[in-house]
Image (cartoon, grey):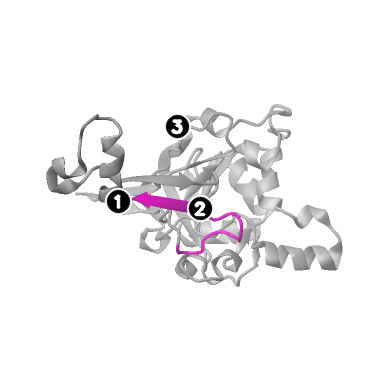
Amino acid sequence: MRQFIDLSIFLENDVLSDPPGLQPNIDYIRHDQGAEQVKLFFEGLDSEDLPDGEGWAIEFVQLCTHNGTHLDAPYHFHSTMNEKLDGKERAITIDEVPLEWCFQPGVKLDFRDRPDGYVVTANDVEMELKRIDHVLSPLEIVVVNTAAGSAYGDNNYVDRGCGMGYEATVFLLQQGVRVTGTDAWSWDAPFSYTAKRFAESGDASVIWEGHKAGRDIGYCHLEKLHNLEALPDKGFTLSCFPHKIRGGSAGWTRAVAIIDDP
């Protein structure tokens, strides 16, 4: 028996899943309005001539490529990538991400017990892998379950959850992982917490440190996943093919986990 688990949030108007100014806007054209549009294509047609007086329903959507559940391309993080592999090269955009990266066995790391704003370390990752008795293989997709997952729909969602630090991210990438994911707004710790660390230290390296790991080893990550609590620690396949936006920094995806029960 094959089981499908939806790991995506909605694109919708009324649930805050982005900071002010970055939220989506959806205008819904209902069937009565659609009937008026149909009339424009057929001279002499009256809307009452249509079955039940109804035309089509469509939506006009204004989006950022980072609204909803989406896959970030290396280009989002920096203009170059792979400085610590084969040498610095142009960062690939979302339409250039290898499709084989986006359909692979998945592994879940559970960091829901970490406080909001906590920066996960490489040691944290190693300890969690030990707990679930798993050795990473190249191209496995690693998703991180944080406290933000259960906060989706709350007004403070963007400030919830822990973040993945530079060393934790590089540790995963050195194992051959090329797609990661989180149920938080960002792969990094929420900006509100990073801003406090930067104010105290003046060290700009703490800003977006997990993202900036892509300068050294190119990778993608999923943000605003949902329902990770429903996943086992391992034993599932994750599908996250992104929308093909030419030259884009990200693409929306209907992320789905697939479990084949024996």
Dot 1 or dot 3, earlier in sequence: 1
Q: Residues within 10 Å of mark 3 (few under 14, many from 20)?
A: few
| CB atoms of marks 2 and 1 within 8 Å | no
Report the amino acid beneath label 1.
Arg
Secondary structure of residue under mark 3: helix
Position of 255 relative to 90 (above/below): below
In the image shown, does 52 or 87 lie closer to the viewer? 52
Q: Is residue 106 left or right of residue 93?
A: left
Between the residue at mark 1 and the residue at mark 3, the CA separation in whole angstroms equals 39 Å
Q: Residues within 10 Å of mark 2 (few under 14, many from 20)?
A: many
Q: Earlier in the sequence, mark 2 or mark 3?
A: 2
Residues rendered magenta in the picture: 14-30
Q: Residue 235 placed where, x, y %?
A: 36, 50
The part of the image, by quadrant, that contains residue 241 is: top left
Query: From the viewer's perspective, is residue 248 above or below residue 200?
Result: above
Percent across and percent down for residue 245 are 51, 33
Question: Which residue is depicted at the point 50% across and 46% down?
Answer: 62
Closer to the chain start, of discs 2 and 1, is 2
Q: Circle 3 sits on which residue?
A: 100
* Dot 2: element: loop
Does the rendering let one see residue 119?
yes
Comparing labels 2 and 1, the label whose residue is closer to the camera: 1
Residue 22 falls inside the magenta stretch: yes
Label 2 sits on residue = 24
C-beta proximity under 8 Å, tags 2 and 3: no
Q: Which residue is mark 1?
A: 30
Queried whether the magenta region covers residue 164, the answer comes back as no
